[in-house]
Image (spheres, rainbow, N blue to C red):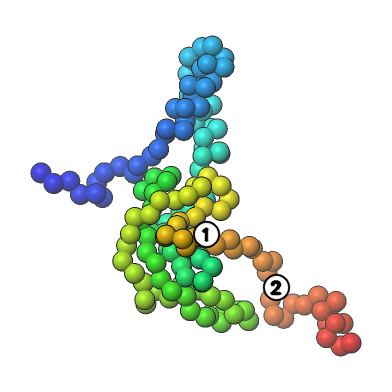
Amino acid sequence: MKFSKMLLPKYTDNRHARAIKVSLNKLFGNTSALNIELAKIISSFSHSTHLVGGSFMISADLRFFIVQKLLSNHWCLGWFCPSKVSWDNHEIRYVPNFIQRGTITRKRINAPFSKYPSVNVRKKNYYLEQVWPKPYNHVGIRLFSQVVGELF
């Protein structure tokens, strides 16, 4: 009987929680059930990756790696694609060109728990694209200093 991958439960990695639990047991000298819960809370903050399905990773030559699915904290599925120039909201940006996407490959995530996880292909590094939030500023709403700056 064949089992579909869709029927399998989502993979959860609890290696880090178990290691923290062992350290807490040694530190406190007991095997309390509270140590297990503390270990889960600590590992959820310190050992969680910033990558999710749909994250863009970009290289220095403006090529993209798009994460399709996280297999674990250290492995992901995704594809490579080149970039294209896009005009969006009075800004010129480089965005992935999904028309020329490559085949889906499995890649190892380097430094998955840091702020800047990466994927390496030989000597080319793809880093997580950091999108900084911008305050909402409708075209009709301008600051007084902007109006004065345009006048003088």
- Up the image or down, 16 lies above or below 95; here it is above
Q: Residue at x 51, y 47 (%)?
A: 111
- Label whose residue precedes the other's in the sequence (1 or 2): 1
Q: Which residue is drawn at 45% across and 56% down?
A: 119
Give, as a three-letter code, the residue at label 2.
Asn
Distance of mark 1 from mark 2, alpha carbons? 29 Å
Q: Quadrant of the C terminus?
A: bottom right
- Up the image or down, 128 lies above or below 144; here it is above
Most distant residue in the top direction = 29
Q: Which residue is drawn at 51% across and 17% down?
A: 25
Most distant residue in the left direction = 1
Q: Residues within 10 Å of mark 2 (few under 14, many from 20)?
A: few
Residue 24 image point, x, y percent: 54, 21
Residue 29 image point, x, y percent: 54, 11
Q: In which quarter of the image is the N terminus?
A: top left
Q: Do the residues labelled 1 and 2 touch (CB within 8 Å)?
A: no
Residue 135 image point, x, y percent: 69, 66
Give whichever of 120, 133 is nearer the camera: 120
Q: In this view, does 117 lie to the left or right of 147?
A: left
Q: In this view, does 152 lie to the left or right of 80?
A: right
The tag on residue 143 is: none
Q: In this view, does 71 lie to the left or right of 36?
A: left
Report the mark closest to the observer, 1 or 2.
Answer: 1
The reply to whether residue 70 is visible in this rendering is no
Q: How crowded is mark 1: few (under 14 residues within 10 Å), some or many (20 or more)?
A: many
Q: Which residue is drawn at 36% across and 72% down?
A: 101
The tag on residue 127 is: 1
Give whichever of 122, 55 is nearer the camera: 122
The reply to whether residue 45 is visible in this rendering is yes
The tag on residue 137 is: 2
Most distant residue in the bottom direction = 151
